[in-house]
Structures are given as C-alpha cells and as structure tokens.
Image: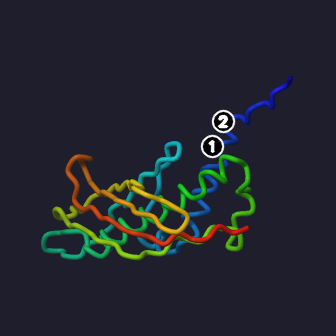
Amino acid sequence: MSRTKPEPVQVIKKRRDGALRALVDGVPYIKFLGIEFERRGDELTAILPFSDKLIGNPLIPALHGGVTASFLEVTTIISLSWAYLWEDLESGALEVDKMDDEHMPRLPKTIDFTVDYLRTGLPRDAYARATINRSGRRYASVHVEAWQDNRTKLFAQATGHFLMPQRRD
C-alpha cells in the first residue's frame, strides 16, 4: 500500500495566494480604495491603508462614512467568496492558472447590509475581519468588525445577508 506524497508547503501556499490575488484583482473598486488582504490559512484580514483621499471631513479629520461602509462590505464579500472557493481549492478541483473572468466564481449579491458607526474612523490604517454566521447554497449571513489601533476598540461593525451564487459546473 503506497501513499501519494503530499505537496510541498510552498506549492500549497502559492496556489492559495494566487487564488486570493485573482479573486481580489477581479474587483477594480478594491484597487481604487487600496484594500489589501492578509491570509492566514483560511482566515482573511482586510487592510485599508490610510490615504488622504479617504478623508470625508478634513476638519476632524475622519474617514468618510461611505469608505467605511464600502470597506466592511468588500471585506464581507471577499471573505464569503474565499470560503466558497476554499473547498475547491483544497481538493484540487480549482486550477489557479484557469482563474480568469470565465472561470472566476460569481460574487455574492447583497440582500441587506447594516453598518453601525461606533466611533470616528481616524486618519490611520484600518483592519476588518468577517465572521460567517450561516452559509448555505443560496443564502449567507455575515458579521464584520473594523478596528484601527486596538482590536478590542471597534470603530465600525456591520451585519449583512447575501444571496450566494450558483456553482458553475
């Protein structure tokens, strides 16, 4: 009885990073805002590097509320898509080389998204992480939290419900 040799960790890491990059690069608005994603296994943390163009009120100065809401929604959608891709990626059913517009998964569609602005978003980098409460074949419920300097001091949070895309055959 012989076992197949496991893939080297570098190959697995390269495949996962390539899939995430293809997913993020497929949404031009992410690049416009400058949002980046840091991956640790299947967990994603979104990073919104500070830029003067993100300021809504220069007198305070504070991050624009629309930027904050967009950051939270983008974090949620990419996190849902990443969870959606994870099984296919790990089973080898998804080839990263073929992740073009035709083979990319469709993104979840927002049903509703409620943002709670808890404090002023300061002119510095922001971070967000989404928690998927429920994800089925057709529907997902997600909670997302955003912070800046201290993970326990959130400046915004949101809850959203999403229509999940049909799997392509």
| Circle 1 residue | 13
CB within 8 Å, label 2 to label 1: yes
Query: Which residue lies under the disc numbered 2?
Result: 9
Instruction: For mark 2, give the secondary structure.
Output: helix
Q: Residue at x 53, y 43 (%)?
A: 41
Name the residue: 70% across, 41% down: 11
Residue 131 location (% of width, % of height): 39, 54
| 3D distance between C-alphas at marks 2 and 1 | 6 Å
Name the residue located 54 percent from the left edge and 57 percent from the top edge.
82
Residue 169: image x %, image y %?
A: 73, 67
Identify the amino acid type marked 1. Answer: Lys
Q: Does residue 110 appear to the left or right of 83 in the view shown? A: left
Q: Which mark is residue 53?
A: none
Residue 102: x and y in percent read 71, 73
Residue furthest to the top in view is: 1
* Nearest to the observer: residue 106 or residue 69: 106
Picture mark count: 2
**Which residue corresponds to the image point at 37% horizontal and 54% vertical from the top-left?**
129
Q: Of the residues shown, which amino acid type is indicated by label 2?
A: Val
- 112 or 124, which is in the foreground? 112
In the visual, does 34 lie left or right of 116? right
